[in-house]
Image (cartoon, grey):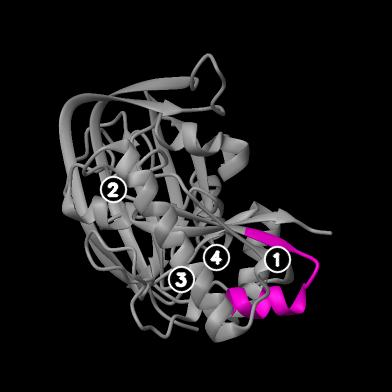
Amino acid sequence: MIRRAAILFALWPFACPALTLEFPQNARMVDQTTTADSSYDMPIGPWTEAGIPTERAEGEVRQQIWQIDAPGVTTLQILSPLRQQLRREGYDILFDCTDTQCGGFDFRFGTLVAAAPDFLIDLGDYRYMAARRNGNDGEAEVISLLISRTAERGFVQVIRAGATQATDTELATTNAPAVRQTQADGPAMTNAPEDFRTRLEETGHAVLDGLNFASGSAQLGPGPYDSLRDLADYLRANPSRTVALVGHTDASGSLEANISLSKLRAGSVLERLVAEYAIPRSQLDAQGMGYLAPLTTNLTQEGREANRRVEVILTSTE
């Protein structure tokens, strides 16, 4: 049993009981924004070429960002207890999706997402849920959860709209039981090679965390890098499989220069895998996307740093 931090939403005019969302004790709220007399267009369906279907809620809009310091936590482990709590509180789940079901890149950039580094979203590993509860006075309140993770922590964005809150958010502790991983959750990230295999085979790609390049340079830092070791272990265990290493940059400079730089960085990673881990070149390819596929905004330093990365894409399973 571990204690949990609980976030209390007190609703006005007390048409329904107060909403309590319990987070693990190692969770912390890193940002909160409250806007009175506003509106929120909450996604209630996946992205299509016609756009994202939304439901508008008017009133007070509150956005909170939580980080959970828990290597190994999965997005399902984070979402499941929150979803159960909302159902117990009388909320109807309107839409519940994983990254590809939501619409991947297009869904993420078509909805409200907090900026890095407070919230980091992995385009190949996120979950979204939208819910609504009707009060006794007939007014609806909506709430959405967007959840993602990195190798070290989980990220939760909570947006609630529709009812004016009587009090500020409070924090409390309870003795609620810890969320425990089940077989359906998949392997925990504490077992890095197994988790890497799961993510790569289920989503088709994964970010190589922690790689270090000097600004404007294609030379990979000395390391060592756990993500490269995990990729090497995977490729040695699956010698018939091939991957593409894809470099990405921020939006500083021309597209042509950034595509060239990103490809050179991917090539530097390829050479490290060959030289230090004896991975055959036949299993590897290096490409560059420049700034064409950002993870987040390029308008902040934190966002630009998040966008500078190398991803691995599974290209063959034969």
Q: Residue at x 38, y 48 (%)?
A: 260
Q: First in sequence, mark 2 or 4: give its number.
A: 4
Residue type highlighted by circle 1: Ser
Q: First in sequence, mark 4 or 1: give its number.
A: 4
| 4 and 1 marks in contact (CB < 8 Å) | no
The picture places residue 37, in percent across and down from the top left corner, at: 17, 24
Magenta region: which residues? Answer: 230-243
Q: Residue at x 84, y 59 (%)?
A: 318
| 2 and 1 marks in contact (CB < 8 Å) | no
Residue at image mark 4: 74
Residue at image mark 3: 151
Q: Which type of secondary structure does the marked residue at label 3 adopt?
A: loop
Q: Which of the 4 image quarters holds residue 93?
A: top right
- Disc nearest the viewer among 2 and 4: 2
Residue at image mark 1: 282
Q: Which type of secondary structure does the marked residue at label 4 adopt?
A: loop
Residue type highlighted by circle 4: Thr
